[in-house]
Image: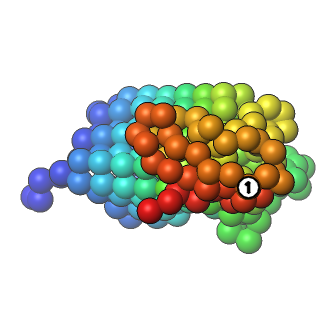
Amino acid sequence: MKEKKYFVHESSYIDDNVEIGEGTKIWHFSHIQSGTRIGKNCVFGQNVNVGNNVTLGNNIKVQNNVSIYEGVELEDYVFCGPSMVFTNILDPRCEFPQRGKEFYVKTLVKRGASLGANSTIVCGNTIGSYVFVGAGAVVTKDVPDHALVTGVPARITGWMCRCGEKLPLSRDTASSETGTCSRCSREYTKSKLTVTELK
């Protein structure tokens, strides 16, 4: 029998037809449903549910009490804070159930994004690379790369370095400026709603 190169706690359930990458750890009371593809070196906390046919990248960290539904895709290095919420249907009704892929609205979370505790990502939106969604925020539209968004509904309140430090750039969407991260010294330029790391 081939040795597993990942860890699954004995209290968790892994359905058939699931791929789990080397070094991944799945902790207590979690459920990974059929058709899911999980990359390498991911960590899933207690009580995590991953729906059918979900694709997850490498080095993802999912904290306790998170459900990742069909239609959601996470790229590498995404952080999902405790009890944050994804949705996958815009107009759910118990009386008129909507089942099947044709009803699921895609959500994409790009590389390096952090989704704070108790935040909600309404389906149909793209969360850009290295975005930081503040705790409790409700995201109702696309978020550009490196944005810091907070509040209900979530609005841009700053800009973030890839290392997680807030950048010295104004939240004014009209201005163009440059700034350097005080933690890692990466340099960025901002023009309207685009923040780009300088090489």
At numbered mark 1, what does the secondary structure look like: helix, strand or loop?
Answer: strand
- Residue occupying the point 38% across, 29% down: 28
> How far from the left and from the top, in percent, is residue 34?
46, 59
Residue at x 30% of width, y 48% of height: 41
Looking at the picture, tell me which residue is in the foreground, 49 or 82. 82
Q: Report which quarter residue 12 is drawn in.
A: top left
- Residue 138 appears anywhere in the view: no
Asked whether residue 108 appears in the rendered view, the answer is: yes
Q: Residue 197: image x %, image y %? A: 52, 57
Figure coloring: rainbow
Q: Identify which residue, 27 or 192, lies in the foreground.
A: 192
Where, by quadrant of the figure, is residue 196 drawn? bottom right
Q: Residues within 10 Å of mark 1 (few under 14, many from 20)?
A: some
Residue 107 is situated, as x and y percent measured from the top left of the image, at 67, 58
Residue in the image at 80% along x and 41% along y: 155
Q: Quadrant of the C terminus?
A: bottom left
**How many numbered marks, from 0 up?**
1
- Between residues 79 and 42, which one lies in front from this camera angle? 79
Q: Where is the N terminus found, in terms of image quarters?
A: bottom left
Query: For this view, does 160 lie left or right of residue 143?
Result: left
Residue 174: % across, % down: 83, 54
Above or below for 151 versus 101? above
Instruction: Identify residue for label 1.
Output: 176
* In-image side of 91 versus 59 (left or right): right
Q: Residue 187 vs residue 2: left or right? A: right
Up-down relation of residue 5 to residue 160 (above or below): below
Spot the residue most to the bottom: 102
Image quadrant where residue 17 sits = bottom left
Question: What residue do we see at 48% from left, 34% from top?
Answer: 182
The amino acid beneath tag 1 is Ser
